[in-house]
Image (tube, grey):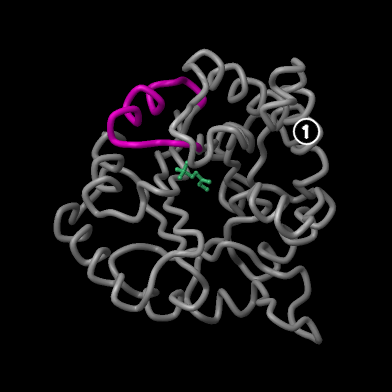
Amino acid sequence: MSPRTLVAGNWKMNGLKASSAMLEELARAHPSPVCDVLVCPPSTLVAAFAGGAFPIGGQDCHWKASGAHTGDISAEMLADAGASAVIIGHSERRADHGETDAMVSNKTEAAWRAGLVAVVCVGETEAERDAGETLARIGSQLAASIPDGATAANLVVAYEPVWAIGTGRTPSLEEIAEVHDFMRKTLSDRFGADIAGGVRLLYGGSVKPSNAAEIFAIKNVNGALVGGASLKAEDFGGIISAAG
Ligand code: 13P
């Protein structure tokens, strides 16, 4: 049996307290969604939004629980603020903040230590795809970014081709299927088919209401990690509806 579809919104550095109105509008339009929904606003809004209609996640965490790390927040702090999940290793963190696979692995362990679901992101650059290195890149990221101890309940993996993020371009359905089949097999080889079969594999990169249904229909795709389209109730709602 396939795991329940998860539609997660990554608000990135967008959103103010007044954005709660968008979530209220979304909840009114989708009182009982056919899929799991997760909203990951900036950390300033986690406490304000937690306990509302949708589970709330962070967008990053430090690997330590506390200490002298100015500007960082820990997984424990996200959990304390009411988050149930955290995105880790997004390509924007990897590019803007030099996050390595080893750091992503440490952060994932921190998320699990704090009882959070880790949404671990992987994805190739356009140059890597053009060079035919996509699967090798995804394989090495999966191996080094995910620590031992993964379960179907504590891990979600998001495949986000860097060149598809915010560009309006997406891989073909066959290209998405190839990577997702590869990710399932890679996780099965390491964690066993029972665990790997339950881990949600999300696709992310220019998902919108008009392409969501065909992406969700791909065999090993169990949902989406949505950026820009998660900021508008109508668009995010359209993607949630497509999961049915
Ligand atoms: P877009 O949906 O805006 O392409 O962003 C995808 C993303 O990076 C989600 O984490």
* Residue 210 among magenta residues: yes
Quick one: label 1, few (<14), some, or many (20+) residues within 10 Å?
few
Q: Residue at x 47, y 17 (%)?
A: 173
Residue 239 image offset from top left, x and y in percent: 30, 40
Q: Residue at x 77, y 55 (%)?
A: 99
Count of residue discs = 1
Q: Quadrant of the N terminus?
A: top left
Residue pointed to by mark 1: 190
Residue 75 image offset from top left, x and y in percent: 65, 72
Q: Is residue 219 left or right of residue 31?
A: right
Q: Residue at x 29, y 43 (%)?
A: 240
Q: Is residue 104 left or right of residue 184?
A: right
Question: Could you say which quadrant of the image residue 111 lies in?
Answer: bottom right
Q: Secondary structure at mark 1?
A: helix
- Whether the residue carrying mark 1 lies under 8 Å from ligand 1 is answered with no
Query: The residue under label 1 is which amino acid type?
Result: Arg
Q: Is residue 81 above or below residue 223?
A: below
Question: Could you say which quadrant of the image residue 180 lies in?
Answer: top right
* Residue 244 among magenta residues: no
Q: Residue at x 57, y 46 (%)?
A: 156
Q: Nearer the viewer, residue 57 or 172?
A: 172
Q: Is residue 118 left or right of residue 231?
A: right
Residue at the left extreme, as displayed:
28
Q: Is residue 223 above or below residue 43?
A: above
Q: Nearer the viewer, residue 197 or 241?
A: 241
Residue 242 image offset from top left, x and y in percent: 27, 34
Q: Is residue 136 left or right of residue 118?
A: right
What range of the chain is rendered magenta?
205-220
Residue 243 image offset from top left, x and y in percent: 31, 35
Q: Quadrant of the C terminus?
A: top left
Q: Is residue 10 above or below residue 56?
A: above
